[in-house]
Amino acid sequence: MKLLDIGEVAKLSGVKPSTLRYYEEKGLIQSLSRNGLRRQYGPGVLEQLSLIALGKQGGFALDDIAAMFGPGGRPEILREDVQARAEDMRRQAQRLEALSEMMHHVAVCPAENHMECEKFQQLLRLATRVQRRGAASKAKS
Amino acid sequence: MKLLDIGEVAKLSGVKPSTLRYYEEKGLIQSLSRNGLRRQYGPGVLEQLSLIALGKQGGFALDDIAAMFGPGGRPEILREDVQARAEDMRRQAQRLEALSEMMHHVAVCPAENHMECEKFQQLLRLATRVQRRGAASKAKS
DNA sequence: CTACGAATTCAAGTTAGCTTGAGGTCAATA
DNA sequence: TATTGACCTCAAGCTAACTTGAATTCGTAG
């Protein structure tokens, strides 16, 4: 199996060596061996890094990512917890879709204050109607 | 017009007073007046706060949020720039949708290492195929 | 075999985004 | 009018996620 040293992984993934060492320390990735002092990574590390990037975009802390997706054979973080977080994530994706539309709109809207634009407000309400678990919903009557 | 003081805004929005003061300092929100020393906010601040929360979920820095959506009559941050960011946001929403599916899957998948699960890998590829602007795409031949 | 460049460790520094605490002000209630 | 509790300012502190730098080791090309 072809092994990569840290510089190659950095070049292929766009993640700096210092960050890779940091991730390894945190248990997010692992090097398979050493060549002298040098870490040797398997090719799978690249997919692992994509996954980490994805998790970060989803707003997860590195520790959470390690707990959900880490290579370190996690001792069963509650599946129902992951299930619930997955639901949250779906809702977040919806909200961001709405945000995308809002941004597309402000890019062309002539209103000087966005909050005065009817369409903008409407999109914002749409986005915020898709609430998170645990978010206080103050619907009237 | 009904004015709210900082504690009420905090209660209604779930955002702490210290954070509200911090946001105001940064130009993300504004208080309309003072009652003695006390800040008085208009009701619109609540929507502004939803917008800020949304922007944060989208991964924007507070300064970026202020620049795009701030109440301070921004001196025209390039519309085409916002347009491009809106596109990125749409793609991010798609990626997070895929992430949501991955999480739903890991919650039920029996595989001890996710990366060995074919379905998981497939979803990951789906997610990472929806690249960002500026992300190095190393598709082969 | 030697030199170079790429890695190594470890401690300390940086940035964003808040939070905390001390010390003081003031509006509203009793 | 006297308290009290909510607010104020300002400086300092905190956490996550990295980055930087100094001093050192080592694999590989010449």
Image (cartoon, coloured by chain):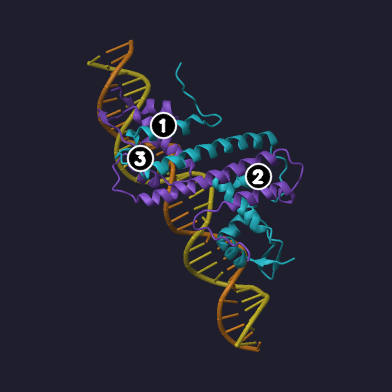
Chain colours: A purple, B cyan, C yellow, D orange
Which residue is the site of mark 2? B67
Q: Position of residue A34 (x, y in %)?
A: 26, 29
Q: Tell me if mark 1 has few (under 14), some (14-19) or many (20+) residues whose alpha carbon lies within 10 angstroms of its own.
A: few
Q: How many marks?
A: 3
Q: Image quadrant of residue A35?
A: top left
Q: Which amino acid type corresponds to the residue marked 3 in the rendered image?
A: Leu
- The subunit letter for the residue under badge 2 reads B
Q: Residues within 10 Å of mark 2 (few under 14, many from 20)?
A: some
Question: Which residue is depicted at the point 33% across and 50% down?
Answer: A77
In percent of the image, x 44 and y 49: which residue is there?
A85
Percent across and percent down for residue A86 are 45, 46
Cα separation between marks 1 and 2: 38 Å
* Nearer the observer, B53 or C13: B53
Q: Quadrant of the N terminus of chain B?
A: bottom right
Q: Is residue B50 left or right of residue A32?
A: right
C-alpha gap between disc 3 and disc 1 = 20 Å
The reply to whether residue A136 is visible in this rendering is: yes
Are discs 2 and 3 located on one and the same chain?
A: no
Labels 3, 1: front one:
1
* Amino acid type, residue under disc 2 in the picture: Ala
| Mark closest to the chain's N terminus, 1 or 2 | 2
Q: Is residue A79 above or below residue B44?
A: above
With B101 as the anchor, is D9 left or right in this view?
Answer: right
Q: Residue at x 30, y 24 (%)?
A: A3
Rendered image: mark on residue A28: 3
Of helix, strand and loop, which one carries label 1? helix
> Up-down: is C15 above or below B134?
below
- Reading the image, the residue beneath label 1 is B122
